[in-house]
Amino acid sequence: MAQPVSLWTLFWVFLRIACTSFGGFMAMISVVENVVVERKKLMAHQDILDGISLASLLPGPVAVNLVVYVGYRLRGGAGALISALGAVLPSFAFIVILSIAYFRWGQVPAVSRLFMGFLPAVTAIIVVAAWNMSRKAIVGVSEGMIAAAAAAVLLGIGGFLSTLAIILGAGIAGWLLFRGRVSRSAANPPPAKPRSAGLRAHAGLALLVMASMSTAAPLFSIESGLLLKLFLTFAAMSLMLFGGAYVFIPLIQETVVQGHGWVTQQEFIDAVAMGQITPGPILVSAAFIGLKVAGLAGAVVATLGIYLPSGLLMIGCTRVLDRIKRSTAIQAALHGVRPAVVGMIFAAAVVVGRTAAPVWISVVIFAVALYALLRFRVETAWIISAAGLAGWWFY
C-alpha cells in the first residue's frame, strides 16, 4: 500500500496551487487536476471527476469544495482542513493587503495588465486539464456525445440550473447506456476510505471543526456580537450559493449593501474586482467586507463563514458518495457524468478565453502556454508567472 501523503505536503501543494490559480473556480480546478493527478499521482482522473460533479451539485465555492474533497479522500478531516487552509491563505493575504491599501489610498493598485496576461494562459491550462481528463472519461462515441451536449448546453444557456440539468441528465444517460457494461467487480470495489480511515478520520473531522473555530475564538473578545453576526451572515449565504461565485454576487450585494449597509455600492464593486485580480477563489472578497466592518478579526470571521459550512457539507456528502459508488447503477450513472464534466470544462475554457483581450499577444500567450504544458509539461506556476510578465510588458 502506498504511503499516505503527509499533511505538510498537502498544505504546500495547495498553497502553491492557490498562488497560481487566476481566472475563477474552473482555473483553480484545472490546476488541481494538473498537480494532484498528472504530477503528484495522488488520485485518479475518475476520482477528481467525481469530486467535481459532487462539488457542482452542492452549495458553496466549487473550487474550495473540490480541495476539501481531495484533502478528505487523502487524509481524512485533518487533510481537508490543511488542504483548504493552503488553498485559501494566499488569496486571503492578497485581499487583506489590497484592502488596506484601498482604504488608505482609495483605489486598487494597478495590476490589471498582469491580469490581462494571465487570462490566455489560464485558458490554456483549462484546455489541457480537460484534454487530460477526456483521455480517461471519453472512450467511445456515446461518451463523446455526452461531453459535446454538456458543452453546448453550458455555452448556449449557462447558469446553475443548466449545470444541474447537465449532471442529472448525464447520470440518467449513463444509467441507460452503460449499466450493462459495468461489471459486478468494478461496481463493488473495496470500500473507499480516506488514507487516515476509521477513528483517525473521525478525529480529523473533529479537528477540522475545532481548529477552525479555535482560530476565530480569540477574536470574539473584540466586538463579539458584531463578529458573530458577520460569521452567521456569511455562513447562511454560503449554504445558499449554487452555481459558482458569479451567481453569488447579487445575493451578497443585496445582503451587505442594501441589507446591512456594511459597504457602499462602489466599495462592493471594488471588492469583487480585487477578488478577480487575486489568485485563488473569488469569494475571498468576503474578507474585504469583514475588514471594513471589524478589522482583521472581521476579515478572518467572514472568510470562515463563507468556506466552513459548505466544506463540512462536502465532507459529509463525500462519505456518502464513497458508500453508494459500489452500486452498479451508480457506477453506470457516474460513467455518464464524467464525460459531461469534461465537456463543461471545455466550455469553461471557451468562456474564459472570450474574456481575454482580442489582440495578437493574447493568441501568442495562449499558444505558447498550450505548447509548454503539452510538450514539456511545464509547471503551471511558471506558465502563470511568464504570462503575467508578458501581459505587463505588451498590454
Image (spheres, rainbow, N blue to C red):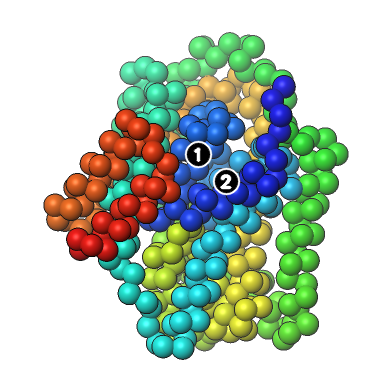
According to the picture, the residue beneath numbered tag 1 turns out to be 35
Q: Is residue 103 at least partly visible in the picture?
A: yes
- Res 236 → quadrant: bottom right
Q: Position of residue 184 (x, y in %)?
A: 63, 11
Quarter of the image containing the N terminus?
Answer: top right
According to the picture, the residue beneath numbered tag 2 turns out to be 13
Q: Position of residue 158 (x, y in %)?
A: 34, 50
Quarter of the image containing the C terminus?
Answer: bottom left
Q: Position of residue 207 (x, y in %)?
A: 79, 53
294 horizontally vs 136: left or right: right
- Give the distance between the C-alpha atoms of the residues marked 2 and 1, in whole angstroms: 8 Å
At label 1, the amino acid type is Val
Query: Measuring 46% from the left and 75% from the top, which residue is drawn there?
Result: 98
Q: Is residue 58 at least partly visible in the picture?
A: no
Query: Measuring 50% from the left and 75% from the top, which residue is drawn there?
Result: 97
Mark 1 surroundings: few (<14), some (14-19) or many (≥20) residues within 10 A: some
- Of 9 and 339, nearer the camera is 9
At label 2, the amino acid type is Val
